[in-house]
Amino acid sequence: MTKRITISVPDDVAAHLERVGARRVSGYVTDAIRHQARREEQLRQLDEVFARTGNPEPPDRERAERFLDDIAAWKQQITQHA
């Protein structure tokens, strides 16, 4: 099931979406939102781990977040080539 939602975006974002192509914009935006939602959930889980184990120093936290980003990028590549 889908639901139509209208949004306003800045001119630079609109220009980018226009280059994506009218027929692909919904899928493109859906993928971007799903990616952001996964990232937010991963960060929430990371916060839970750190709450149990103690907060790391900022460089260690940044390294953990980069690791999550690398995993997400790798999973996306696997999905695209499948």
Image (tube, rainbow, N blue to C red):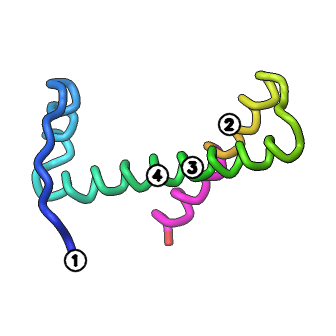
Residue 23 lies, in percent from the top left, at 12, 58
Which amino acid lies under the numbered mark 4 shown in the image of this protein? Ala
Residue occupying image coordinates x 45% and y 46%: 36
- Residue 30 among those drawn in magenta: no
What amino acid does circle 3 point to? Ala
Gap between marks 4 and 2 measured at Cα: 16 Å
Our reading of the magenta stretch's main secondary structure is: helix
On the image, numbered disc 4 is attached to which residue? 37
Measuring 53% from the left and 46% from the top, which residue is drawn there?
A: 40
Q: Relative to residue 28, is residue 34 drawn left or right?
A: right
Q: Dot 1, crowdedness within 10 Å: few (<14), some or many (≥20)? A: few
* N-terminal label among 3 and 2: 2
Measure how far apart labels 3 and 4 are at the Cα level. Answer: 14 Å
Residue 8 position (above or below residue 40): above
Q: Nearer the viewer, mark 4 or mark 2?
A: 4
Check disc 2 and report the residue beneath it: 66
What residue is rendered at 57% in x and 52% in y?
Answer: 41
